[in-house]
Image (cartoon, rainbow, N blue to C red):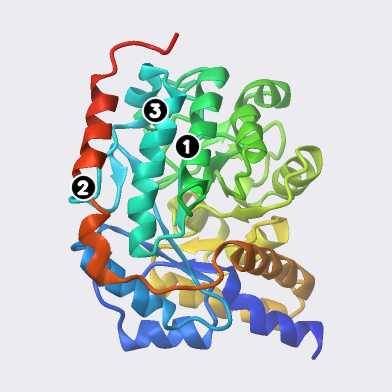
Amino acid sequence: MSSLDEARQRLGELFIIGFNGIELSDDTSAFLSQAKIGGVILFAPNYESPGQVAELINQVQECRGDLPLWVSVDQEGGRVRRFKKPFVSLPDAQTIGTLDSPKLLFEVTAMMCKELRSVGININYAPVADIMTNPKNPVIGNRAYGSNEEQVSKMVTAVVRGHLVSGVQACVKHFPGHGDTSVDSHFALPKVDTSPQILRDREFKPFIKAFKSRCSMVMTAHVLISQIDPELPATLSTKILQNILRQELRYSKIIISDDLEMKAITDHYGAAEAPVMAVKAGCDLLIYRTEAGARAAYEAMVKALEDGKLPPEAVLQAAERSRSLKKEFLMPYQPVVVGELGQKIGIPEHQELLEKLAGKPTAEA
């Protein structure tokens, strides 16, 4: 088999896709299995109850090939959480950060992730490693653990460890830092004029500490860092993803794009061009919140491979990173036993731990 044929076979592995509904439609099921899609992302409209979402995830995994799919969610706590009651509800990161208790945060995160794992989630897009250096930031705000590097770093490492002990991959975000922006990348392209040296001394550090805590996934920021790459946002920038993240910081694991249907990308770089640019820049996995967006991007990338605009090696390297971590982390695969969920989610011990967090008066000595 030629590298081009192999890249066509492996292309679907690069996609993490959203879809509609609380059940898996035949069309979505066919796309997942025929295109060999690498994973899915669930949102609030996909969730009704723990039993329902576990059944849905079992349906998703029935579409798997030789390896399970990544099944991912944004369950940070505070305002960003897709699964509501009876899942435990963590306070926002800013509130947790003021308690200054990494030990308690580790315990609470492990508890939250045990609940996620019990329904079949294996990636959570958390923690936010952005430092709240701009009080007017509309997209990060109270999602950050603090306004200084040391505070954010120790909280981020506690969250990463809490995920891993519970069998969920943490995905630290948004590299190289979204804390100093004043524009929401869901709606426009933010620009940051911070010097590379300040970024190294401040923004990069929580990410570096997360990697040392064995975090194997990092999400990119749709942010233009003008003093490093004045042309392209981090998600599409070889200078940021290859020169800095891969070479300077020696990060070798998975790079995940933020949602490529956000206006910071679609309004500036084109729906067909952006996924090609992202993979060429160094992204291994591409998030699409809608199935329609994912299908269009998949077709665009097939065409780019055939036209020679996307090197097969870039696709094969990205797919291999994903598959390698799946073999290490998701095997052997076991479907969720739905009948056992009542003993695992929203149980009294979890509520007591949350109350301990809420009642903690001062920083640890």
Mark 1 and mark 2 lie on one chain; the one further toward the N terminus is 1
Question: Which disc number belongs to residue 104?
Answer: 3
Nearest to the observer: residue 326 or residue 46: 326
Query: Where is residue 308, by image quadrant?
Result: bottom right
Mark 1 and mark 3 lie on one chain; the one further toward the N terminus is 3
Q: Which residue lies at the image location 19% right of the left edge and 62% below the top edge?
A: 49
Q: Amino acid at mark 1?
A: Val
Nearest to the observer: residue 173 or residue 71: 71
Question: Which disc number belongs to residue 347?
Answer: 2
Please name which of the two marks, 1 or 2, marks the residue nearer to the observer: 2
Q: Amino acid at mark 2?
A: Ile
* Disc 3, SS: helix
Calculate the distance from the C-alpha at mark 1 to the C-alpha at mark 2.
21 Å
Calculate the distance from the C-alpha at mark 2 to the C-alpha at mark 3.
18 Å
Query: Picture coordinates of residue 196 (x, y %)?
Result: 71, 27
Nearest to the observer: residue 259 or residue 22: 22
Query: Picture coordinates of residue 246 (x, y %)?
Result: 76, 46
Residue 111 lies left or right of residue 322; in this view the side is left
Vertically, is 239 above or below 120?
A: above
